Amino acid sequence: MGKIFVDARGSSCPGPIVELSKAYRNAKVGDTIELWATDPGVKSDVAAWAEKTKNKIESITEQQDKIVVVIDILNR
Amino acid sequence: MEKIVIVGAGAGGIILANSLNTKKFDITMLDKTALNVFQPAFLYIAFKGAKANIIKPTAKLLKKGIKLKIEEVKKIDLAERQVVTDIDTYHYDKLVVATGSITDTTQIEGLTEVNKQFGDYHTSIENAKRVWDSLSHFNGGTIAIGMASPICKCPPSPLEGAFLAEELIRKKGLKSKTKIAFFVPYPRAYPSEAMNEVVEPLLKERGIDVYTFFDVDSIDTGKKIISSIEGDSIKYDLPIIIPPHVGVKIDYNPSSVLDSDRFIKADKYTMRIEGFDDAFAIGDATAIPTAKSGVTAHLQAKTVAKILSGIDVKFDGRTNCPFDMGYGKGSFVIGSYTEPVVRYPPTRIKHFMKMMMEKIYWQSLKGTYDFMFDAYFKHTDPAKLNRKYGSKQKSV
């Protein structure tokens, strides 16, 4: 059970979801992915992604300089 | 004189070398091939059967005084400030890595076999011709087109392929017996929302089926089925699949400067390789979170040339990816680190501008059109365009 850290701050094209997909490819059930982003679209994108891939969003926190999304990998 | 070694003589490396003062710097370029290829034309070889007159000798594209060595780089030792090739060892004061990206079909089960038979339009002229051959022999069925992993150079290129395939099929009179299945690992057809709003109506209008969250896991070449990590599948007759992109195979010391796909970790503003003040990486070779495209390589090369010359500047993440939407219309994907992508509608003039790039490419490597590019980038500033065309909310 590992923690995968993804820094996608500043990425708007193609976007943070690309970095998340890339991390998911190497993830295993039980891992946690922590994604940092500045693109506000990340919130809805990650929600749709988690629903599709059947993984769980643990938290979405808006900080002053970034959005932090924590995802529990339940399915891979 | 300060010794500068540039590894890689693609567009980024050549623009960088030509932007430096050869009286102030001792510049050596290393590349395993002596030829430069205009890669954006692969799209037109694959989907329009265009002639492949897109290669020039690198030596003819460089200013006088730049040394070009046709050698294969084996190791980059950042700690010892040296580059080892198959022939020699080069010591440097400053290093710029501009090695681009390569495709790797071995990452996906079944993809090597598919690629050998049907080709792709990101690897080589030969592979692009194979796509054209496959399309020329196609008589109906399902064309499955998309990307095999989330990273590829030229973010608009997967959709460009789908749009041009549809245009070709319609012109050949095969539309009624053809299904075009476009698959992406993203939540929508185009990853940035603003540009997706532009392309979605076009996809509907042209009857292209979109499979989102489709990250290719494996291909069963016997049953002709592509399966995704998310659990979906597409049955194909003609697969046109963009292979995963990775960094080139060069040993680095320390190896920690590479990510898991061998892309180089570098500062997104200064392009300095993580942990090193005297080494830079530009273009497709980096893990910097921006589009892998010629324009990015161009602008990063210009920024690094200024930094090397003692000017304190930063790359702002500006993208300007040309986007062919078929039927003679095109657009550009324009954004930056601080400005979200513009909702930029397609027009004929933008398509014309994209097509003109092939004509001015070689001269643009020499800096002949810098004045024109400077004016263009100023005129198409993403903040200005976003005020005109609107976009989604601003970044945090």
Image (cartoon, rainbow, N blue to C red):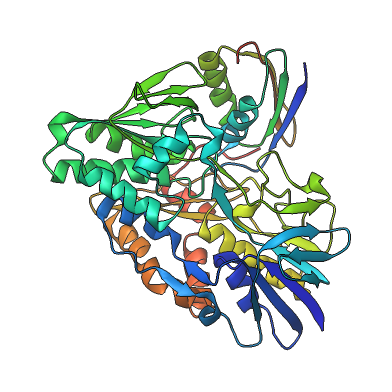
**Snapshot quadrant of residue B118:** top left
In the picture, measured across the screen, residue A76 lies left or right of residue B92, that is left
Q: Is residue B304 left or right of residue B234?
A: right
> Camera-side residue: B46 or B335?
B46
Closest to the observer, B341 or B15: B15
**Quarter occupied by residue A2:** top right
Relative to residue B34, is residue B39 depicted above or below? above
The percent position of residue B134, horizontal first and vertical second, equals: 27, 43
Q: Position of residue B121 (x, y in %)?
A: 40, 49
Q: Is residue B277 above or below residue B139?
A: below
Q: Depth check: give the residue in front, B342 or B94.
A: B94
Q: Residue furthest right?
A: B80
**Above-or-below relation of B19 to B101:** below
Q: Which quarter of the rendered picture does the C terminus of chain B lie within?
A: top right
Q: Quadrant of the N terminus of chain B?
A: bottom right
For the question of whether residue B190 can be seen, the reply is no
Residue found at x 80% / y 44%: B256
Q: How far from the left and from the top, in percent, is residue B389?
A: 41, 47
From the viewer's side, name the closer residue of B116 and B395.
Answer: B116
Counting from the top left corner in percent of width and height, residue B104 is at 54, 42
- Does residue B172 appear to the left or right of B28 in the view shown? left
B49 vs A35: above or below: below
User: Which residue lies at the image location 69% right of the left edge and 69% below the top edge?
Assistant: B6
